[in-house]
Image (cartoon, rainbow, N blue to C red):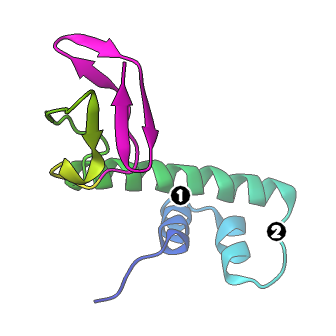
Amino acid sequence: MNRITYKDCIKQAAINLQLDDVIAALDSTELPTADVLSEIERLADCAKMTAIEIASDYIPLTREEEAASENRRIRISSLEERVSAIVSVRQGVHNVCFKLEQQIIFSN
């Protein structure tokens, strides 16, 4: 299976929009002019936003999970899913202050 790259997406968008200077720049080994570079960057931003939207349908960027605490401590390893960041901790319906140290969430 061939993987599509951002460059492929940008080039296809340039073809669809008939942006000949962008197409030529993407096929060239020379640096593009400032105007063409600006257009490539704008198309790259659109490709990134699209990829993020598609990915978020399959991989939730945030999730909520209930976890029991022991002495106001929650071990990261006790959570069902792997996490890259803790956004908030609640006790009941109220957010509580917390800090993360050595794979343990401490709440006040």
- Name the foreground residue: 20 vs 87: 87
Dot label at residue 39 = none
Quadrant for residue 105, please give it.
top left
| Foreground of the two, 31 or 79 | 79
How many other residues sit within 10 Å of disc 1, few (<14), some (14-19) or many (≥20)?
few
Q: Is residue 92 above or below residue 53?
A: above
Of the 4 image quadrants, the one containing the N terminus is bottom left
Write down the region rendered in magenta: 83-108
Residue that numbered label 1 is attached to: 17
Q: Earlier in the sequence, mark 2 or mark 1?
A: 1
Q: Secondary structure at mark 1?
A: loop
Looking at the image, which is closer to me, 78 or 88? 78
Q: Position of residue 92 (x, y in %)?
A: 16, 14
Residue 71 is situated, as x and y percent measured from the top left of the image, at: 24, 28
Q: Residue at x 15, y 36 (%)?
A: 67
Q: Residue type at mark 1: give it.
A: Leu
Q: Amino acid at mark 2?
A: Pro
What residue is shown at x 19% (from left), y 32% (from top)?
69
Tag 2: Cα neighbours inside 10 Å, few (<14), some, or many (≥20)?
Answer: some
Q: CA distance from mark 2 to mark 1?
A: 18 Å
The residue that label 2 is drawn on is 32
Farthest-out residue, top: 94
